[in-house]
């Protein structure tokens, strides 16, 4: 059993010093101005942005400084983010409302564009998630990237800019400012995915990610053009202020929200623009953890949640969002069941779980519209709450799983699970923490994933009585739950179970460096020389494992998640433990059905892979991998020329003509 090395004293001192300095600065600002932490939200993206500049200026003098400077910036951002989240959710600041701060950016005779911050419960939730996960990822990266030499300077500069862009997107007060940070994230993802650009596969993956997400961004920009042309503003507070104005322009709202969702489809890798995310695994595993758990792909979900006051006026958009999410969740889960690359399993898992979130948000928007249309009191939107609740829980257990896989790859120097197995003895901390993450995403009672997954199923099922398509979507979501439990159990068993030394079929090369390529293989003996990761890497895993287990309890403890993050009316909580919610969940037959399906998936995962990678699956991997629709779309969409030509057609010929003839400024 490998020993875990402690955190170097120098790094430990830096961790403590940076956090203390951040707390002291925040305390000084609060005492000197008597303001809420919310009023300093504009500083949150500034800290990592300053780190980015400092790393470029001083990092090349000493490559080790890059990690320290990045940790310095993210420490301040995380402390300020958590302080704002505490102020919003514990002190009740801006409960049911928002706090906005604006400055004029530029103006003309009949128009002006402003920039500023817009903080409400949605922004507070994302600040909480990004603040925790980004800090732990940067801390993990200091050890994980230790062997990269001067490359560390570029890595920590790019990841600091990436984090700054996500923070800026979250606190922005308008769709225009959000779009700027949205595009900056796209540039950063291109740089980070192609970090090892000398590898043709990494360079290709970076270009694919950049081009595919640009397709969605064209639709997003078109949606913003429609909104500005119709309402003369892109500020959230002005767009959402008067529902009657939105109801007077329902056709424009429908097309605008459909286009906004098109942007989310690209950024969050939903069908059919999903193809970039699995290949994005070419970047460092820490980048994958940040992209999948806290930043890029969550930006698409955030956009739909932010535009929720618009979407509730368009039932067509709501159904389209729900259907896209449900379909993506099912198909991506089927792909994850047959992947042998541990990072690709997690990549398809992310696509599937994001589909869950979109399914919940679409169901919530449609339910709210239906209640209003029927003359009923809509109350609070269960789907909205469930989708964002799952976003939070997923961020913690997916960051845990990706960082855990990074620790495994760091130890065994391969991503192929067929060359792993038996690592639970050599890597006990990693195996236990990843096991907790697996139980959470599988929806085992009473881990965090159990609470949010079942809330999503309930929200979708509630709509089935009034709209038949939601019945089909509920069944798809239930089937996805079983598949999720199976492929996550399969991943853990192939990695940590079975003998550590054995004969395996090893992959030598592939024609297109993908799971569906023409593999050249050979048999070879694998002898495990794995060791547990150092404490600077296992400590983030332990913190995230605690969150993966217990974050779901925020639904039923204290005021409850639904009394703080909601659309419509808040859930009125009484008492320190919300027994009414617990009773509702535990007394529902749907809960027992979903738990049974999940446990069945775990059971088959254990039975088929109890010998680790030597186990055999009862599923036809050739059919799922080569015949299923993902193969068809991958073949069609993987041609770069198609993307380039599509963007040329849409942008230069169609969108350019549209914008030239559109009345952009209201007279």
Image (cartoon, rainbow, N blue to C red):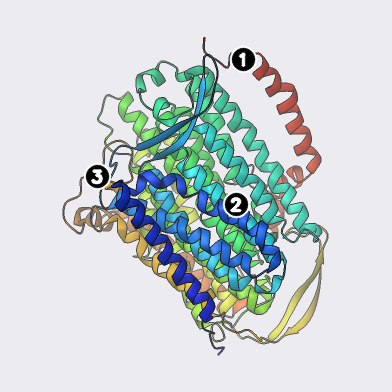
Q: From the image, tell me which residue sits under label 3.
A: 571
11 horizontally vs 374: left or right:
right
As helix, strand or loop, the secondary structure at mark 1 comes to: loop
Question: Tag 2 or tag 1, which sits nearer the N-term?
Answer: 2
In the image shown, does 310 or 172 lie closer to the viewer?
A: 172
Q: From the image, tell me which residue sits under label 2.
A: 161
Q: Which residue is farthest front?
A: 32
Position of 623 relative to 364 (above/below): below
Q: Report crowding for label 2: few under 14, some 14 to 19, many 20 or more residues within 10 A (C-alpha).
A: many
Q: From the image, tell me which residue sits under label 1.
A: 662
Where's residue 373, x and y in %? 33, 24
Closer to us: mark 3 or mark 2? 2
Q: Give the quadrant of the N terminus.
A: bottom right
Q: Is residue 398 visible?
A: no
Where's residue 26, x and y in %? 37, 56
Where's residue 366, x and y in %? 40, 33
Closer to us: mark 1 or mark 2? 2
Q: Is residue 440 visible?
A: yes
């Amino acid at each position: 059993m490998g020993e875990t090395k402690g955190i170097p004293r120098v790094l430990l001192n830096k961790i403590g010093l940076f956090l203390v300095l951040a707390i002291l600065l925040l305390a000084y600002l609060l005492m000197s101005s008597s303001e809420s932490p919310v009023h300093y939200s504009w500083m949150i993206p500034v800290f990592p942005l300053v780190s980015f500049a400092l790393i470029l200026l001083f990092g090349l003098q000493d490559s080790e400084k890059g990690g320290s400077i990045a940790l310095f910036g993210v420490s301040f951002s995380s402390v300020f983010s958590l302080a704002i989240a505490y102020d919003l959710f514990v002190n009740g600041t801006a409960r049911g409302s928002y706090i906005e701060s604006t400055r004029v950016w530029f103006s003309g005779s009949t128009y002006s564009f402003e920039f500023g911050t817009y903080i409400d419960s949605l922004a507070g939730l994302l600040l909480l998630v990004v603040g925790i996960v980004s800090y732990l990822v940067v801390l993990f990266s200091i050890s994980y990237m230790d062997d990269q030499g001067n490359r560390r300077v570029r890595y920590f500069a790019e990841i600091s800019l990436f984090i700054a862009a996500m923070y800026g997107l979250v606190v922005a007060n308008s769709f225009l400012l959000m779009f700027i940070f949205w595009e900056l994230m796209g540039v950063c993802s291109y740089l980070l995915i192609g970090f090892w650009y000398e590898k043709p596969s990494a360079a290709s993956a970076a270009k694919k990610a950049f081009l595919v997400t640009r397709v969605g961004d064209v639709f997003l920009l078109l949606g913003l053009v429609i909104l500005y042309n119709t309402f003369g503003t892109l500020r959230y507070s002005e767009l959402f202020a008067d529902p009657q104005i939105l109801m007077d322009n329902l056709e424009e709202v429908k097309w605008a929200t459909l286009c906004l969702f098109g942007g989310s489809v690209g950024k969050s890798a939903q069908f059919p623009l999903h193809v970039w995310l699995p290949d994005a695994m070419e970047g460092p595993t820490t980048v994958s953890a940040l992209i999948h758990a806290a930043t890029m792909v969550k930006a698409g979900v955030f956009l739909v949640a932010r535009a929720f006051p618009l979407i509730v006026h368009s039932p067509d958009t709501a159904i389209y969002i729900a259907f896209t999410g449900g379909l993506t969740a099912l198909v991506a889960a089927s792909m994850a069941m047959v992947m042998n690359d541990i990072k690709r399993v997690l990549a398809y898992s992310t696509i599937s779980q994001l589909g869950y979130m979109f399914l919940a948000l679409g169901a919530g928007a449609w339910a709210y519209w239906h209640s209003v249309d029927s003359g009923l009191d809509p109350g609070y939107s269960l789907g909205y709450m469930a989708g964002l609740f799952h976003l939070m829980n997923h961020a913690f257990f997916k960051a845990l799983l990706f960082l855990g896989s990074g620790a495994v790859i760091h130890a065994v120097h391969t991503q192929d699970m067929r060359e792993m197995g038996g690592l639970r003895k050599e890597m006990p901390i990693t195996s236990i923490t990843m096991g907790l993450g697996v139980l959470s995403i599988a929806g085992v009672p009473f881990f965090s994933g159990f609470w949010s997954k079942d809330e999503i199923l309930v929200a979708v099922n509630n709509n089935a009585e009034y709209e038949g398509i939601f019945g089909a979507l509920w069944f798809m979501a239930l089937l996805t739950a079983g598949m999720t439990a199976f492929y996550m159990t399969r991943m853990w068993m192939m990695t940590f179970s079975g003998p550590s030394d054995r004969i395996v079929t090893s992959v030598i090369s592939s024609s297109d460096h993908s799971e569906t390529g023409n593999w050249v293989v050979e048999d070879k003996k694998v002898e495990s020389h794995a060791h547990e990761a150092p404490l600077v890497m296992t400590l983030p895993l332990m913190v995230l494992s605690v969150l993966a287990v217990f974050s779901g309890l925020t639904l039923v403890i204290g005021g409850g998640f639904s009394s703080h993050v909601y659309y419509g009316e808040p859930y009125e909580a009484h008492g320190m433990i919300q027994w009414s919610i617990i009773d509702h969940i535990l007394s529902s037959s749907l809960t027992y059905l979903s738990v049974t399906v999940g446990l069945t998936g775990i059971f088959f995962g254990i039975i088929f892979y109890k010998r680790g990678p030597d186990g055999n699956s009862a599923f036809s991997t050739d059919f799922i991998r080569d015949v299923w629709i993902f193969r068809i779309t991958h073949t069609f969409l993987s041609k770069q020329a198609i993307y380039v030509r599509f963007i040329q057609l849409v942008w230069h010929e169609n969108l350019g003509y549209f914008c030239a003839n559109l009345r952009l400024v209201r007279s």
